[in-house]
Amino acid sequence: MKNTKLYNVAQGQRNEVKQFIKFAIVGGSGLIIDYLVLNVLRHVFETSSQVAVTGGFVVAALSNFYWNRNWVYPQSRKIKKRKQLPTFLMVNFVGLLINLLVVHFVEISMTSLMTELVKAIGLNRGGTFLGLNVTKAIAAIIVMAWNFIVNRLVTFRGATGTTSPTLPEEKIESVL
């Protein structure tokens, strides 16, 4: 395992790997918050899926901002919150739009599929719940990639000591 190419690459990028793991932990906790708020709003308060998705996403995004700023990218605290938060919120607003689009285009089909699956295993209920939650999982995967890339390059760009990623050509030129 230690002599594999992946291991060697990971060793060379140790700080990046560590930062991504922290980001994933924060994102995972944000996803739990997102799902809790989503399901309470949708299934307890019986709001529309769009309202529930929006509520869960906003609460999770605010939690993620706090933890990203203070734990994942602590160096970014040199940037004032009033400058950093609007950027973070704009990135997350695009993430919210992605969420809403996925829910809009996928939820009905997924709910139908989950309802049939639930019936096939002999249950009468749960298709709507599963449909929304599986749809949200699909959206979350897409949005996680978007958020990591854009927040890393824009919102918290000072966190690794660089202002922009170094392209391979720039690395080669700096050696010459």
Image: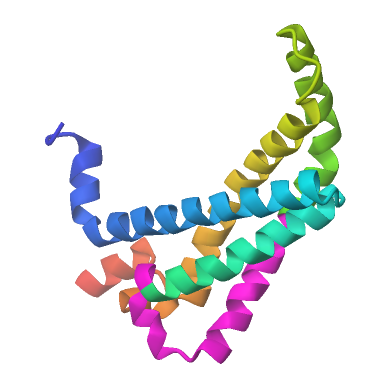
Residue 77: image location, x then y, percent? 40, 85
Above-or-below relation of 127 to 93? above
Q: Nearer the viewer, residue 163 or 50?
A: 50
Q: Is residue 123 above or below residue 4?
A: above
Q: Identify the residue shown where x is 63% and y is 50%.
A: 36
Q: Residue at x 82, y 51 (%)?
A: 45
The residue most toward the left is: 3
Q: Quadrant of the C terminus?
A: bottom left
Q: Which residues are magenta?
A: 71-98
Q: Quadrant of residue 134?
A: top right
> Residue drawn 58% across and 70% down?
62
- Residue 92: within the magenta? yes
Residue 66 in the image: above or below residue 143 = below
Tell me where residue 114 appears, x and y as whole percent. 76, 22
In the picture, residue 72 is in which quadrant?
bottom left
Task: Classify residue 79 as left or right of residue 124.
Answer: left
Image coords of residue 68 (percent x, y) = 44, 69
- Give above or below for 33 relative to 72: above
User: Foreground: 42 or 24?
Assistant: 42
Residue 39: in magenta span = no
| Most frequent secondary structure within the magenta stretch | helix
